Image (cartoon, rainbow, N blue to C red):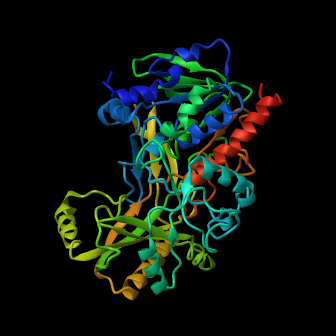
Amino acid sequence: MNRRSRSEEREAVLHGNSNDGSLAPLDATEPYDVCIVGSGPAGTVLANALAARGVRVLMLESGRGLQAWFTDRRVRSLAKYEFSGNTDYPLTRTTSRVLGGNSNFWTGRCERFHPSDFDRHAYTPPENPWPITYADLDPYYDQAEQLLRVRGGPRSTFSPPRKGPLPLPPRPDISFLKQLGVTLGVTFEESATATPTKTLRIFKVHREILPACLASQCVTLVTGANVTRLLAGSDGCIAGAEVKGLDGTTKVARARCFVVSCGGIESARMLLLSSSERFPNGVGNTHDRVGRGFNEHPNVSFTGTLPHSWATIAPTNKIARTHQFYSAYRAAGLGSVFPVIRQAWVLPNHIAKFRLANVPRTFVSGLRRVFRAPLFVGCGTEMTISPANRVTLSQSQTDLFGSPIAHLIMNYSEDDLRLLDRARGLLRGWLSQLRVRNVRELEVAWSRHHQGACRMGRSPATSVVDADLRVHETPNLYVCGSEVFVTGGAMQPSLTIVALALRLGDHLAGRLRNGGVR
């Protein structure tokens, strides 16, 4: 067992209602109301919503604190997966097994999807449109922004519609970037961002939200609990979840309802691993839909320099985005784009691959920033939905418990490449208008937004879960996270994940209250 810091121990044993590595809570004589697999934003927000209604929740998290993630090879090995395809997708800094999930590493960006994302467009699978609309999520977006303390200035007419301002005012001042936008004829605005109260920069759900859950005594958290498969009965209901500890202990978690919130790759893997006589190809996979339609956000980007001014001479990090071009290419049968502009002395592109060969050039570029102001422009793009892009199971590698690891297959379509070129042309035009010097294009970077592998829809023949996120053929199993998205848009998925979790909380609480789950 790894030694952990006192702060980690406090996080893992909050209010005496969590258990690190001990599977004793699974011996409860009565089943829990809801068992949630995963403690990331989806799982934690859902647990919080259910606890507020007095629902008894068991939350199972494979990881522990950050120190265990960085020092325990066994824990890190559980996040391993394979990849094949022409996208050169990264195998590192992509998935994690840690309390709070990827909220430990995100930038806090909290933009809404656009209404047009939920409408039929060129990238919508013709056989499987979104079963919900923007109006269905609008009130939950409001709640999500309050819960995450989202900050930002007034939204432009290009942004998704809203009834009022964001909960908190903007920080920092991006007037210089907005002025560049005036030169370009582009409306830039603050990037809506979650605001922590217990850390300086990153909104971590296990610090900001989880403590109140555990204090309610309605939520029992078990860390170091590895769910290896879901156990389905002959009636299609999930009777339990098989849980293994790193010490070899094996137990079964019992609940009236189960929610898989393991992330966009691992949730699909969990369903595929859970084969049985009733579901020989995995739970929810009678029609071979689980894992299919995986998509991400490839980003094109450039760096360059401008003459210094009073607004750029201080070594600051400021970022602005524009919704103005979001649907600009949809008329041409392509996806959406979400451009960004940034002045950053130290880390202009945090999602770029680290390459040792680039260190000398990066060092020289850093020195040049004393004489000329750095400028970064980038653009996240939407990917087409292809059933061939999928999460499946490895044929050659297994994890610590003998289960196949995930194998991700992802290739660019011709439309993906066309859209990346359109985005490059847009950014090059900006750089030319602003007379930026020392321009350098960076390699395509990935946002680590894992979407679409368990998408929602109206039919089990074309989707995995229904509009309420319930697995079609399984009365008491749900999936919550960006893996249920039908299309990926170009937005960051976090706010929509939280909105869906809040909506699912309402649905589950009502179902349990009305006796809809045995």
Image quarter hosting the N terminus = top left
Q: Residue furthest right?
A: 514
Note whether residue 108 is visible: yes
Picture coordinates of residue 278, whole percent (x, y): 68, 29
Is 128 located above or below residue 241 in the figure? below
Answer left or right for 6 relative to 150.
Answer: left
Compared to 5, does 136 lie above or below? below
Vertical order, 165 against 331 (above or below): above
> Is 497 or 485 nearer to us in this picture?
497
Residue in front for this viewpoint, 300 or 51: 51
Residue 410 percent across, percent down from the top left: 47, 56
Whether residue 400 is visible, yes or no, is no
Q: Is residue 265 above or below residue 50?
A: below
Q: Position of residue 9 (x, y in %)?
A: 40, 25
Locate residue 418, reporting x and y percent.
49, 75
In this view, the residue in front, 16 or 228, is: 16
Q: How many marks?
A: 0
In what quadrant of the picture does the C terminus appear?
A: top right
- Residue at horizontal 16 percent and vertical 64 percent from the top: 360
Q: Quadrant of residue 316?
A: bottom left
Q: Residue visible at 33% across and 28% down?
A: 5
